[in-house]
């Protein structure tokens, strides 16, 4: 196989990155071990209320709500949260976090009427969590803190913040399935989850005993997290039985509550002190259908890739993509499953990067390189002629341990015809890192910061040591699990800085995970690119 000069100090096959790690550097990960025999139990944590103003939802603390987003390893117990009085409720259809526990955004007079009524409540295992006092405030949001520990019995599984989506008012409140227009939520968390994985999920019934809620996994963070979580992208964990978690893949399911859970892992590297607040929950009514796996009306391509450089075509709504295993830096073995549509997941990864180079870059792309091409991509296209390059990507850690990033890799050619037969760009590279591990960095050095698409980024720049090609990397200052944006904004910023030439042509857009170690569970659930 031809080797591909990549934007690090090493070479990469079939997809580049711009990553460099100090020798021995590794970011501690999270555990995604299955539950003990007998499966995961989600206990019925009940949050009591005492009084409710007419027309408002259940009292502060929220109503019954067990932890159905099961902890790493699998057992969710129950604790009781209570309050003495329900504060006044103030509607806010743009951000559900108002500083009050009550949510009263179900009113035909609201524009839009998002039909959400309920309340925030804390829940936990009884030992891992401290609830802020007050639990919710206008300045901090709704907050929890504490310390998780390794517990082989899974009794100390962690704690979380819950929100009823459709709960009747009154002391004897009743939970019902949410059937309003909202499909997703743009969520902002502040603080640090420590080494703990965060699971954002949706309970599927009012009765949660012995149930596991489908969820989206968020990798451990130390400086907050922002991302989009949708009903249809939250999935049942592989260790849950069909009786415990019933939601079908790609459907919205039957959401009752949202739960944001700090999940204790099964190793010392996946537990510890945390302090997390939710400050923004923005309802999204029309998230669009720009190629997300779960919104594909027509798909093709599904299977498993285990060969070192195996690749396969998939389509979503007629757009052609290529998924690649790309275990370029190791021969220890890696397997990914893919499809239907633009979805893939790392199920086996035995490699370890050598000398700072990643072991692999499992990814999905549009464009042409190494004798492979996707149909109808609109590439190559001159940088000077680009209108928009709309793209969306949602990924999940699913308890993955080890060291990895989540990054776009974008290639440019000096030729208007591109470099369809080459395994490296003749022009240069641009990367967009949504997630950066602690001990791994792009090539070169950080030169400045930038605000693009409403997000803050650190800008790195250096040259590929094997071919001298320039590489500019934009690293999110706050880790992101989901982002929908115009990639051309980054490209034109790089042109302005002199790192990309307007005479070049855009040839390839990849997204995936550079893995230095671990990585089992990493998953792309949503990817799309449209070049105009």
Image: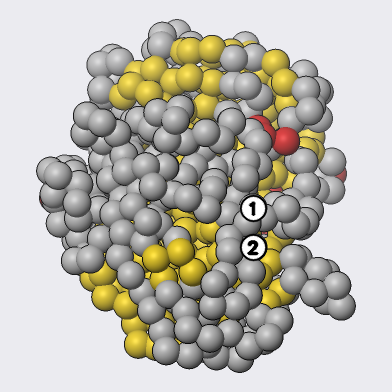
Query: Where is mark 2, residue-wise?
Result: 166
Choose top left, top right, bottom left or bottom right for residue 292. Answer: top right
Q: Residues within 10 Å of mark 2 (few under 14, many from 20)?
A: many
Chain-order first, disc 2 or disc 1: 2
Toward the viewer: 453 or 124?
124
State the quadrant of the N terminus: top left
The reply to whether discs 2 and 1 touch (Cβ–Cβ < 8 Å) is yes
- Determine which of the numbered discs, if any, sits on residue 373 in the image: none
Q: Residue at x 55, y 90 (%)?
A: 87
Toward the viewer: 239 or 5?
239
Q: Residues within 10 Å of mark 1 (few under 14, many from 20)?
A: some
Asked if residue 151 lies left or right of residue 255, the reply is left
Q: Residue at x 52, y 27 (%)?
A: 344
Q: Residue at x 29, y 54 (%)?
A: 77
Q: Residue at x 15, y 56 (%)?
A: 149
Rendered view: 241 above or below 384: above
Question: Residue 93 location, x and y as percent?
Answer: 72, 74
Question: Residue 325 location, x and y as percent?
Answer: 46, 19
Asked if residue 263 lies left or right of residue 464, the reply is left
- Residue 520 visible from this viewpoint: yes
Q: How many numbered marks are there?
A: 2
Question: Residue 109 location, x and y as percent?
Answer: 87, 78
- Residue 71 visible from this viewpoint: no
Asked if residue 468 lies left or right of residue 118, the reply is left
């Amino acid at each position: 196989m031809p080797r591909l000069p990549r934007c690090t100090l090493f070479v990469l096959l079939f997809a580049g990155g711009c990553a460099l790690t100090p020798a021995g550097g590794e970011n501690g990960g999270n555990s995604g071990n299955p539950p003990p025999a007998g499966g995961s139990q989600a206990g019925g944590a009940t949050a009591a209320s005492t009084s409710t103003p007419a027309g408002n939802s259940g009292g502060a603390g929220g109503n019954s709500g067990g932890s159905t987003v099961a902890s790493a390893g699998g057992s969710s117990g129950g604790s009781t949260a209570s309050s003495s009085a329900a504060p006044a409720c103030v509607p806010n259809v743009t951000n559900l976090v108002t500083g009050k526990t009550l949510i009263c955004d179900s009113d035909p007079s609201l524009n839009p009427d998002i039909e959400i009524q309920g309340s925030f409540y804390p829940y936990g295992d009884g030992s891992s969590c401290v609830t802020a006092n007050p639990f919710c405030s206008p300045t901090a949001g709704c907050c929890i803190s504490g310390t998780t520990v390794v517990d082989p019995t899974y009794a100390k599984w962690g704690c979380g913040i819950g929100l009823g989506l459709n709960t009747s008012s009154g002391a004897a409140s009743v939970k019902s399935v949410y059937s309003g227009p909202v499909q997703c939520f743009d969520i902002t968390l502040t603080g640090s989850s420590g080494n703990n994985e965060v699971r954002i999920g949706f309970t599927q019934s009012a009765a949660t005993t012995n149930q596991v809620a489908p969820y989206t996994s968020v990798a451990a963070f130390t400086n907050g997290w922002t991302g989009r979580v949708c009903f249809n992208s939250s999935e049942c964990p592989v260790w849950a039985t069909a009786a415990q978690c019933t939601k079908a893949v790609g459907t919205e399911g039957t959401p009752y509550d949202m739960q944001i859970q700090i999940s204790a892992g099964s190793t010392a590297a996946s537990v510890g002190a945390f302090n997390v607040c939710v400050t923004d929950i923005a309802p999204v009514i029309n998230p669009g259908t720009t190629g997300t796996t779960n919104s594909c009306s027509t798909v093709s391509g599904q299977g498993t890739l285990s060969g070192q450089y195996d690749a396969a075509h998939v389509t979503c709504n007629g757009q052609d993509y290529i998924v690649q295993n790309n275990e370029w830096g190791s021969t220890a073995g890696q397997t990914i499953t893919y499809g239907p549509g633009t979805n893939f997941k790392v199920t086996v990864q035995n490699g370890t990067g050598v000398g700072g180079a990643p072991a692999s870059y499992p990814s999905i792309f549009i464009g042409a390189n190494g004798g492979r091409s996707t149909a109808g991509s609109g590439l190559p296209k001159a940088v000077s002629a680009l209108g928009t390059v709309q793209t969306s990507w949602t990924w999940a850690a699913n308890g993955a341990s080890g060291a990895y990033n989540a990054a776009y890799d974008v290639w440019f050619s000096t030729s208007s015809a591109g470099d369809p037969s080459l395994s490296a760009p003749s022009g240069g590279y641009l990367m967009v890192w949504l997630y950066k591990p602690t001990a791994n960095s792009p090539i070169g050095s950080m030169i400045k910061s930038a605000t693009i698409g409403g997000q803050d980024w650190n800008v790195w720049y250096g040259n590929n040591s094997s071919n001298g090609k320039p590489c500019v990397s934009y690293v999110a200052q706050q880790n992101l699990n989901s982002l929908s944006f115009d990639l051309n904004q980054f490209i034109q910023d790089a042109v302005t800085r002199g790192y990309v030439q307007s005479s070049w042509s855009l040839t390839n857009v990849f997204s995936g995970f550079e893995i230095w170690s671990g990585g089992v569970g990493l998953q792309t659930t949503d990817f799309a690119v449209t070049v105009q």
